[in-house]
Image (tube, grey):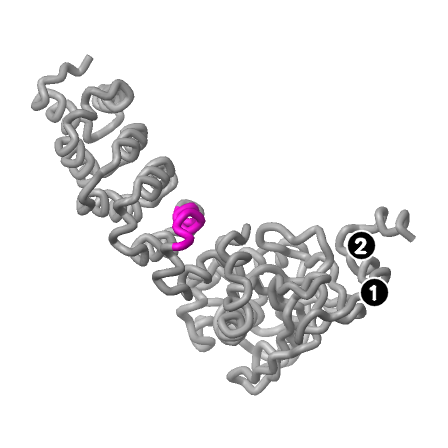
Amino acid sequence: MIFLIRNLDRRLRWLAVGLVFSICSTDAYALTAPDSLRVPLKVKGDWPEYPLTAGQKEIVFEDTIGVTHRIRMLLRQDGTPEGYVSRIETPVCTDTLCALADISMFWTLAGTYWAFDTIPTKPLTKNDHIKFNTKDYDKLHELLQDEQSILRRRHKDDLFDKEVKRVSQVVDAVTGATAREVKEAVVEGAVYTSFTLYHLVHSQLAAVIREDAKKNVLPVLKEKLLRSPKTDERIFYIRESPEEHLRENIGPIVETIPVAVPRDRLYIMKKLPVDLWEKEEVQVYIARKAAELDVHSLSFYLNQLKSAKTVHAGSLRYLSEVLDGFSVNQLRTYLALLEKAPGLLKDSAVLANIRKTAANPGYQYSSYLKSFLSKQGIELQ
């Protein structure tokens, strides 16, 4: 049996493992062997090497068109929550061009998209009941990973150009051509399916999952969320935690800043209590990662240094390494900070980096650095 399991495709291997192990519940989310899950078809990031099982407890939710969805928690063998799963069976359009969508969706503990899997013998289909191919599933996965897709801001009535009509060659139906502004975002020939699944994953079902996670996950798994390899789960912890929790866990919270998307990165930085910006570990760590920050986050960070009572030398030293990526306003702020710590101009590393950037003909603001050096009585070379 063990030999056979090792030689199975990874997506099927966990199914076999689930049949071998005798699984028992450790909490209200009881485990059941028949629900052991294979590795999904498409996964954002990594899928665990250990088997996951769907718990027995269901969250029942009726969406805006009256379809009932059942969401279950993904559990490790010891009952520890790992995410959420729901088999979505839903109509996606009002005419006969579309078949029902039948697919398993997976979310992280933060209620963000994680993965999807097809149902055996029930592939997704496009217009005229054409089956999805590999590129179509790749496109759907790409769409579902984009939390800020244009579809988020569109109504179903906005999906088609009503001036251009398309006649089905298979069924007796007519529809509009895909609107130009959404065409690049969706699976070609599956606009309704793309739209419906996107809104279920990111809006309706995600909201239900987040509420359950706040109630049942956050109170007991703070450490797991805070140190999760999934950035979304760390962001969830930070968003839902009071100020005292941020103070107690400043290390992993600051480490989340450079790996978060720009919107979340700036949110974390703004949520940090002002006095924490005085800490050397905060200032220096973010300075070390300055090259990974977007322009808005970098500007916010420099302004925090400007407002701090103490600017630690290490932060200015690391920032000097990436001056050629600064905007003119960021450069002015940095130089103003240096003027408050004139001793740093004697630091060989800082001075060498400033001279190097000032001498770079490709840096459009090098004249500011040359002027600064001249003002300080320091030669370019």
Q: Which residues are magenta?
A: 248-257
* Tag shown at residue 22: 1
Magenta highlight on residue 348: no
Q: The residue under label 2 is which amino acid type?
A: Arg
Q: The residue under label 1 is which amino acid type?
A: Ser
Query: Where does the image place residue 49, in percent across and percent down from the top left?
Result: 70, 51
The residue at which mark 2 appears reads as 13
Q: Is residue 301 left or right of residue 338?
A: right
Query: Where does the image place residue 272, in percent across and percent down from the top left?
Result: 31, 55
* Tag shown at residue 253: none
Q: Quadrant of the C terminus?
A: top left
Magenta highlight on residue 249: yes
Mark 1 or mark 2: whose residue is earlier in sequence? 2
Foreground: disc 1 or disc 2: 1
Residue 191 at least partly seen: no
Residue ID at (74%, 63%): 37
Q: Is residue 337 left or right of residue 22?
A: left
